[in-house]
Amino acid sequence: MRTFANFILKEVYHITRDWRSLLVLICIPIIQLFLFGYAIRTELNEAEIAVIDHSKDYITQEITNKLISSGYFKLNAYIENENQIEHLFKNGSVKEVVIFEPHFAKKLEKEGKASIMLVADASNPNIGTLVTSYTSSIIRTYQLELNSKAIKANTLIIPEVKMLFNPELKSVYMFVPGLIALILMLVSALMTSITITREKEMGSMEVLLVSPLKPQMIIIGKVVPYVVISFFNSLTVLALSILIFKIPFEGSFLLFTFESVLFIITALALGILISTIANSQLAAMMMSLGGLLMPTVLLSGFIYPVENMPLVLQWLSYLIPAKWFLIILKGIMLKGLGIEQLWKETLILLVMALFYIAISTRKLKIRLE
Amino acid sequence: MNAVEVNGLTKYYGEKKAILSLSFNVNDGELFGFIGPDGAGKTTLFRILTTLLLPNEGYARILGKDVIKDFKFLRNHIGYMPGRFSLYMDLTVEENLRFFASIFNTTIEENYHLIKDIYVQIEPFKKRRAGNLSGGMKQKLALSCALIHKPQLLVLDEPTTGVDAVSRREFWEMLQRLKEQGITIIVSTPYMDEAILCDRIALIQNGSLLDIDSPNDIVAKYKKRLLSVETSLKHLAIKSLENYEHKVSVYPFGDSIHYTDIRNNFETADIKDYLVSKGIVDCKVVEIEAGIEDVFMSLMKEREHEQ
Amino acid sequence: MNNNKKVIEVSGLTKRFGNFTAVDKINFDVYEGEIFGFLGANGAGKTTAMKMLTGLLSPTSGMALVAGFDVYKQSEQIKMNIGYMSQKFSLYEDLTVAENIQFYAGIYGLTDKQIKEKTDFLLHKLGLEDSRNELIKSLPLGWKQKLSFSVAIIHDPSIVFLDEPTGGVDPITRRQFWGLIYEAAENKRTIFVTTHYMDEAEYCDRISIMVDGRIEALDSPSKLKEQFNSKSMNEVFIQLARKNQNQFV
């Protein structure tokens, strides 16, 4: 045990002595977070909207005024019918069209409910969500006002949201789970494969192998510090996302930790597998980037929805651990799901972890060839 | 007992034969040298002996144990210094030593007496990173690291390659002291002049042994008459001797030229006369004892002829 | 070497790295067609001095002319007029013999016709015609070293710098290598060589021995042995290097 502790200590020296690399390792996730965060999240300021008012009564008038006076929206035009919407979106002059159904005020009075349709240009999905959620919230505030005046208690205005051009609409929040998966993969797999092949390149692996240390010990000793770093990284990203980007975290933190560790182990096993094949740091890096990171970015659903891909790629995506980890993370963070709903994905991840550990330990060599 | 017993050891890399049916023994407590150029197969042999590679044919027993079956035992009892430097350059002197002690389940304190002679010389710099040490100091540290677990056999692969003459001499002095402590040492070197510092040597070339014996006996087996020619016109003398009808070999050797003749019955004066006739008036020709390097080159030539 | 044309002139050449003086006011001249041995213990400053002379490193102070060019301002001209070969790297292992020759001839601006002639000439001279299309990594070390020396002088430089060219090479090939060096020197090429083999020091016309950044001895091998009352260059070297041992472990 003392041997093992010393081994880890030596690894910690390596990492801390090379403080530039360490700094990069810690800062890159944060930089990525801000890049993704700000590239996606744009401040809503006087977004142009159009209104189709089939009712033209005092309530629709009031709602329209509320929207415009909020400062977030600017009225571009009143239009007469729905046929014009696509044209407006296509030439980019408006971001959203608000449609009041006929006899809006009357319906509200009689039936206690009326509906507004919000059609947004979702070609930029983030702006699409942003405008509709702002609009919805202004309408909700207005509805509360109405109710509190107690003139017409329990009235209900239902905003119906419809997205054009990108009906599946990805949430602004989606990138955080993806980023966490990417970072864990990057640090765990890439860094471990590089650090192990470095010993091979330097020739020190010979001495380590000729010692009584078991090869498993050498490998585990080398990866433990990187597990700590990558876990620290994922916590930083999570904390920053919650604090700065106000991303919801609905589920259990304990479950998040457990699933992250599971994913880290899978990534490490992959990194070790690469290091048993690669003989140089360069080869290890190429294999990690090409074989692990690219698929993680492209096939996990992080950026591009897998459902729209050719079937072969969809099947391939089932083999990507990050795909399952992403489903789990989104479930925990955004939907507040627990293990009862996520056990299937967790099981798949667990099987993958065990599988990769099994083959990477089988490939570990007690000799040089 | 034999510390090392090797029989018919052969290793291929694909089609290429790295070592070819080597057989030899190393006695307990012996300082045994493998002398040969790069690519002779020294590193491959040492890696088999240290359990890092599996041979294709033959067997090797170290300390009475088989290098394949008993690799776990052997890894506890061999100290190995590979040719490429195995120190961690970003760790300090002390951290390196502590690390190597710990992977063998021991501590610096426990075995300090083993390395004391060598380590005291670098101890003043123990807080310095290994990367900032001079070549000679790195060597001392690497040797300390290989010794810290009290190995019964020390395997040193080209420890003096690329090291200056002074540090080399010091290194061999350290090896002599270790030998006195009863540690068996196997060492390889491309420097022929280091051969005489070993108890016994094996001359190795192209994966086979040219000869194996004590340095004195190896030299004694050299039956040819060897002449040394000294002159200020060395280059001209070499060219002239190359064209001499009776010559076998002509090699520059430091400040002189070593010459062998195809005849057995000839006078040194014959050679001198020939050289004078070529305009080399100031030459001095004397018969000398051969050195290891003369023997090596002669054996190398014989092998080439056989093939 | 009965000619006094200086091809390297060094005076007061110094290189400091921070507080550490790697090369300390060295002075020497090297003449045309001379084989100049540049010896010293590891860390004595040989490599640093050699880097300054080949235009890779700018000196802190002092003066050096190589092939008549100033190391401060004319490093480009120096590079065109010198050849360089080191033990560690010279040829590309994954290119063939012919490809390596073509590559080096190409970077020195030889014409296609010259390259072809040179390639054929070198392959013939070194007896490598049959290995023309073999990868460098399949050649024995000795052949590689002979080839890389020939490649280092492919552009007919007036000076060749050789950094431990024979490390690890077998004794016969080592001597053949020196045969190439002598031949180049006869063609009025100047050879500037470092080595750890003390017998090779004896093959040089003159040698300098560096200790702790300074040149402590400079003369022909026989004069040095006389001066230090030693039988071999090895003894001379050890006497000099040991002198400063106690200050610098």
Image: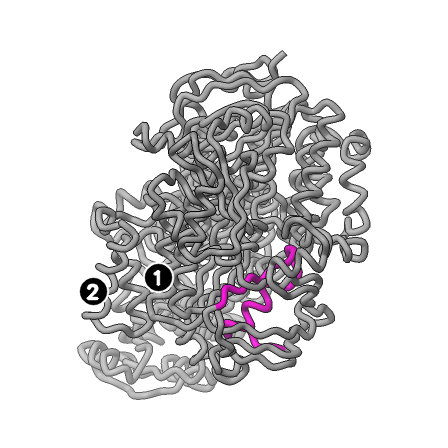
How crowded is the residue under tag 2: few (<14 C-alpha within 10 Å), some, or many (20+)?
A: some
**Residue A362 spot, x, y in % from top left:** 44, 28
Label disc, if present, on residue C116 of the rendered structure: 2
Residue drawn where x is 70% and y is 70% of the image: C21
Query: Which residues make up the magenta segment?
Result: C34-59
Residue A47 occupies quadrant: bottom left
In depth, the one of A145 and A216 nearer the eye is A216
Residue A41 occupies quadrant: bottom left
Which chain is mark 2 on? C
Label disc, if present, on residue C151 of the rendered structure: 1
Question: Which is more N-terminal, label 1 or label 2?
Answer: 2
**In this image, A54 relative to B45: left or right?**
left
Give the residue type at disc 1: Val
Res. B168 visible in picture = yes
Q: Secondary structure at mark 2?
A: helix
In depth, the one of A94 and C75 nearer the eye is C75
Give the residue type at disc 2: Lys
**Residue A122 spot, x, y in % from top left:** 31, 70
Q: Quadrant of the C terminus of chain B?
A: top left
